[in-house]
Image (tube, grey):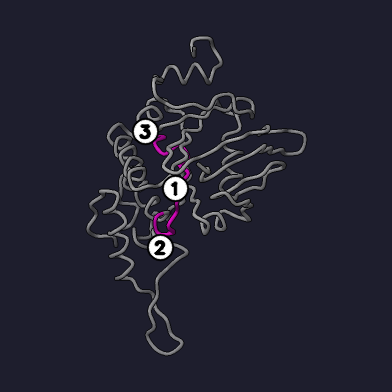
Amino acid sequence: MTPLLELSGIVKAYGAMVAVRDVDLAVHKGDVLALCGDNGAGKSSLIKVVSGAENATEGTMRLRGEPVTFKSPHDALMKGVATIYQDLALAPRLTIYENVFMGAELTHTLLPFVKVLARGKMAREARSYLSRLSIDIEDTRRPVDDLSGGQRQAVAISRALRWDAEIIIMDEPTAALGVKETGQVLDLIGKLRDDGHTIILISHNMHDVVAVANRVAILRQGRKIHDRPIDGLKPDDITYMIMGTEAAA
C-alpha cells in the first residue's frame, strides 16, 4: 500500500550543524504515529520540514504518492497537512468561531461589491466541528480565553478540520495539562483517528504514546533508530529505546 506521506533520505542542516540525518519515514492512512526522542534528537527540525516551515537540505517527500515540496505552512495546509503547535497559535481574546475560521472567514454579499462577514454561519459551523469531536460548546461566540486547555486543543483541531486536513501533526498536545484535560485531549486524538484522519504525535509522555499511538518512530542525534508497532510496548520500554539501553530488548 502506498504511504499517505513518505520521507526518503531527509537531511536538515543549519550550516555545519546537521539536525536530521538521512531519515526515511512512511506514514500510512489512519496511523497515529508517535515521533519520540530526547531533546535535540531532531524531532522539531523534521516536523518543520513536514509542516512546510522549512525546506529539507537533502531528500524527498511524497504525499499520496506524488513528490511534494511545501513552500510554507499555509501551502502544506492547503494540501491537507495541518500542524498544531504546543502554543496552539490561538488568539485568546477572539471568539471560538473567529479562531476556527481565522484566515478562511466566510462572507455573504450585502450589496453589489459589498461583502460582510457571515458571523452566524461561522458560529454554527464552528459548533458543528466541535460536535464532531464530542465537545459540547453551545455558544461559539465565547472568547477562547474562557476555555480549558482541552477545549482550546479542540478549537485548534477544529481549525484543522475546517481546512479539511487529512494529516494532523500535534506537537506536545498534553504538555502542561492536568490529568482530566490530558484525558480529554487523548480522547480527541481517538476521535480524529476513528474519523479517518492520520496523526503524527510528538510527545515526551510515553503513557500518552502507548495510550493512543499504533506506531512509534524514535530519533537520536538526528537519525531514526527505531520504527515499530506499539503493540507489546510499555511506557518504560519506549523510554529505554530513547535512551539506548539494553532494557529495550
Q: Residue at x 53, y 27 (%)?
A: 227
Q: What is the three-letter code of the residue carrying label 3? A: Val
Ranked by sequence position, the earlier of labels 2 and 1 is 1
Q: Is 175 contained in the magenta span?
A: yes
**Is 106 located above or below residue 149 in the figure?**
below
Query: Which of the pair 80/145 is nearer the observer?
Result: 80
Quick one: label 2, few (<14), some, or many (20+) residues within 10 Å?
some
Q: What is the three-letter code of the residue carrying label 1? A: Leu
Q: What is the three-letter code of the residue carrying label 2? A: Phe
Q: Residue at x 46, y 37 (%)?
A: 201
Q: x%, y% of residue 45?
A: 61, 38
SS class of the residue under badge 3? Answer: helix
Which mark is in front, 1 or 3? Answer: 3
In the image, is 39 to the left or to the right of 15? left
> On the image, numbered disc 1 is attached to which residue?
88
Q: Point out the residue furthest to the top here.
A: 246
Report, in whole angstroms, how far the alpha carbon at label 2 lies from the one at label 1: 14 Å
> On the image, numbered disc 2 is attached to which residue?
101
Q: Point out the residue furthest to the right here.
A: 16
> On the image, numbered disc 3 is attached to which residue?
212
Query: Which of the pair 109/116 is nearer the observer?
Result: 109
The quarter of the displayed image where residue 22 is located: top right
In the image, is 142 to the left or to the right of 235? left
In the image, is 183 to the left or to the right of 57? left
Ranked by sequence position, the earlier of labels 1 and 3 is 1
